[in-house]
Image: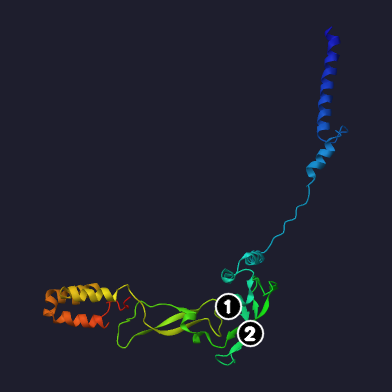
């Protein structure tokens, strides 16, 4: 029995060895057993997919494009003064550009050809859109206009009550709807003309009634003179009478140099 079982064991061992070798051969990829779906799988792994193209834009070009888009959406500052769909002849000077000529005769009527600025819309007398028109004005420079046609800055540091009367340099700007030649902003020498809120009638009343105690000088901000009048009982009445006359004629004014109201 044992002699008959020995060949069977040898056959089993040999079959196991052959099976092991065949599996190693197949797994190494050189065997003839290939799965049908293995090749497409390998192709799908190696396929890089759709090609993507990236465009690198230089920073200078990017900034230029951004500034162009920003400028195209910005509203010009003069548009705040330009009414929409109004008469072109009544537009403010900041909304139009005119071909002026300084060789005209001063004080004489003159006409100039004008064009509205970009983004400004206006119409003519027949309510039709218009861009080119003619404007009528008087031949004179902006600094030659009457005082009612421009506004000037005020100075609160010069003395209005002084002899001679003081002046100051002011920056003046022509009103929007006034047309003239030259710069619309110009310097001009003006007399000091400002007020701090002191009333002439109040100062005169205090000088007459309580001037002996220096109330008028205290009211005008002249506290040193007020103390002098207070402790001298109005200079025994003489100083009081003098102040009544000086305040009455306007020679004595507020200490800050302003005018009475």
Residue at screen point 50% across, 87% down: 144
Labels 2 and 1: the sequence-earlier one: 1
Picture residue at 16% right of the left edge, 74% below the top? 227
Give the vertical position of 253 relative to 106 (above or below).
Answer: above
Position of residue 248 measured from the top left corner of the image (x, y, whole percent) = 25, 81
Q: Label 2 crowding class (10 Å Cα cut-off): few <14, some 14-19, many 20+?
A: some
Q: Tags 2 and 1 in contact by the CB under 8 Å rule?
A: no
The quarter of the rendered structure image containing the C terminus is bottom left
Q: Position of residue 4 (x, y in %)?
A: 86, 10
- Describe residue 185's horizontal placement relative to residue 64 as left or right: left
Report which quarter residue 170 is drawn in. Answer: bottom left
Residue under pointer 2: 112
Q: Nearer the viewer, residue 201 or 92?
A: 201
- Which of 5 and 126 lies nearest the eye of the viewer? 126
Q: Secondary structure at mark 2?
A: strand
In the picture of the structure, the residue carrying the numbered disc 1 is: 93
Side (left or right) of 73 relative to 150 = right
Residue drawn at 58 percent across, 93 percent down = 105
**Which quarter of the picture shows residue 64?**
bottom right
Lateral position of residue 34 relative to residue 227, left or right: right
When the figure is inspected, residue 8 is found, relative to residue 118, above or below; the finding is above
């Amino acid at each position: 029995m044992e002699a008959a079982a020995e060949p069977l064991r040898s056959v089993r061992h040999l079959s196991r060895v052959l099976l092991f070798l065949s599996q190693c051969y197949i797994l190494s990829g050189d065997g003839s057993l290939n799965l049908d779906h293995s090749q497409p799988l390998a192709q799908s792994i190696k396929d890089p997919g759709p090609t993507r193209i990236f465009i690198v834009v230089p920073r200078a070009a990017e900034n230029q494009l951004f500034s162009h888009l920003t400028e195209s959406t910005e509203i010009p500052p003069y548009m705040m003064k330009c009414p929409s769909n109004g008469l072109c002849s009544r537009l403010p000077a900041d909304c139009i550009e005119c071909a002026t000529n300084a060789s005209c005769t001063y004080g004489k009527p003159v006409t100039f050809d004008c064009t509205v600025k970009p983004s400004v819309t206006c119409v003519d007398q027949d309510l039709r859109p218009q861009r080119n028109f003619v404007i009528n004005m008087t031949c004179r420079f902006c600094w030659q206009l009457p005082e009612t046609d421009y506004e000037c800055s005020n100075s609160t540091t010069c003395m209005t009550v002084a002899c001679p009367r003081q002046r100051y340099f002011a920056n003046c700007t022509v009103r929007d709807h006034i047309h003239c030649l030259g710069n619309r902003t110009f310097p001009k020498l003006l007399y000091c003309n400002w007020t701090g809120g002191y009333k002439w009638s109040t100062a005169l009343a205090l000088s007459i009634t309580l001037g002996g105690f220096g109330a008028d000088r205290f009211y005008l901000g002249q506290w040193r003179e007020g103390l002098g009048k207070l402790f001298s009982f109005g200079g025994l009445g003489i100083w009081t009478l003098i102040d009544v006359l000086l305040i009455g004629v306007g020679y004595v004014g507020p200490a800050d140099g302003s005018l009475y109201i």
